[in-house]
Image (cartoon, rainbow, N blue to C red):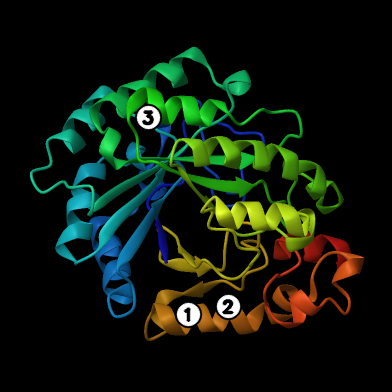
Amino acid sequence: MNILVTTVCNRRCPYCFAASRVSNAPENAEQGHESSFISSENFARALAFASKHEQIMGILGGEPSLHPNFSSLIEQTWVAGFCAKVFTNGVWSEQTLDEVGKLPDRTPSNLRLVVNTNHPDITSESERIAQQRLFSMLPEHCCLSFNIHSLSQDLGFLVDIIMGHGLMREIRLGIAAPLAEHASEFIPLSEYPKVAPLIMALAERCDAHNIRIGFDCGFTLCMFTPEQLGLLYSWGADFKASCGPAVDVGVDLTAWACFPLATLSKSVSIDEFRDSLELGRYFEEYFDALYSTGALSECIGCKHLKRKRCSGGCAAHTYRRYA
């Protein structure tokens, strides 16, 4: 489960998958209103809701570090017994970086920063400097994340950043998913096989530097050849081709299955469910047709889809095809 702690963001990525929920994204994040940030009380309620079945708590935005009590939320997560897994763009103020750096109980096992890193071609100098400041102060906590949204971007720069700053030797690799009912930049499923060579080149270089690649949801088995899949396995990549509810909880404690399906998720509150497990099962049943159909014509009769080894791409692709 993930908790959205703010709807404010200080970056505008062309492929943003959270656009339907990050409604207050001013150029100057200080313009955010109180309703843009989760209260300590609501945050505590969300943590308690997940306490029976979760060990790691995802903390999302917007950009979570913009919350005025960001470091306190991290401590609150620890007190509740969770590891804090923060999904961030790494563009932190010096004050925020100093506050988190001084947390007395901070360890690599209880604070994980998944830093969404854009290609240098679309990264401003100020963003680059801010990320480097974070990498220099908290390298043992930082895991790079990258969302593929172009067929022309070499991904080798990720290895250079990891090796240059001594970061965690792990990359979370995503592929930009469409929003079910909003416009965003993404790669059509028909183009996925063209993405495979980019991933293979990165994976081979990662293997040489003992860097593990973890795949987020939305990939497909058929975008790779059997030989490529075998190489990914031998190189230690954690490949998966699944799609299902991530379960995100907003600042007002309403919940949705995931950002791409946020506008389709029936407006529900965590108060309507016993715990996070029951909420996840609710979304599994609610979107079962999308999770089990697949978005490609090749998915019809596919043994991998039937065996649930592949979901046929992000469910938002399926919705956009059949809606």
Location of residue 186 by image quarter: top right
Give whichever of discs 2 and 3 has the lower sequence position.
3
- Residue hosting label 2: 283
Amino acid identity at mark 2:
Phe
Residue nearer the viewer, 273 or 192: 192
Residue nearer the viewer, 39 or 130: 130
Q: Where is 244 relative to 188, above or below?
A: below
The structure residue drawn at horizontal position 59% and vertical position 39%, both measured from the top left corner, is 204
Amino acid identity at mark 3:
Glu
Q: Position of residue 77 (x, y in %)?
A: 23, 59
Amino acid identity at mark 1:
Leu
Q: Distance between the residues labelled 3 and 1?
A: 33 Å
The quarter of the rendered structure image containing the N terminus is bottom left
Between disc 2 and disc 3, the foreground one is 2
Relative placement, left or right, of 40 versus 306 is: left
The structure residue drawn at horizontal position 29% and vertical position 41%, both measured from the top left corner, is 141
Between disc 3 and disc 1, the foreground one is 1
Instruction: Give the structural element (helix, strand or loop) at label 2.
Output: helix
Give whichever of discs 3 and 1 has the lower sequence position.
3
Q: Distance between the residues labelled 2 and 3?
A: 34 Å
Residue nearer the viewer, 108 or 97: 108
- Residue hosting label 1: 279
Contact check, label 1 and label 2, Cβ < 8 Å: yes
Instruction: Give the structural element (helix, strand or loop) at label 3.
Output: helix
Q: Position of residue 124 (x, y in %)?
A: 53, 17
The structure residue drawn at horizontal position 76% and vertical position 66%, both measured from the top left corner, is 312
Q: Where is residue 316 in the image (x, y as percent from the top left)?
A: 73, 61
- Residue hosting label 3: 30
Relative placement, left or right, of 154 versus 205 is: right
Contact check, label 3 and label 1, Cβ < 8 Å: no
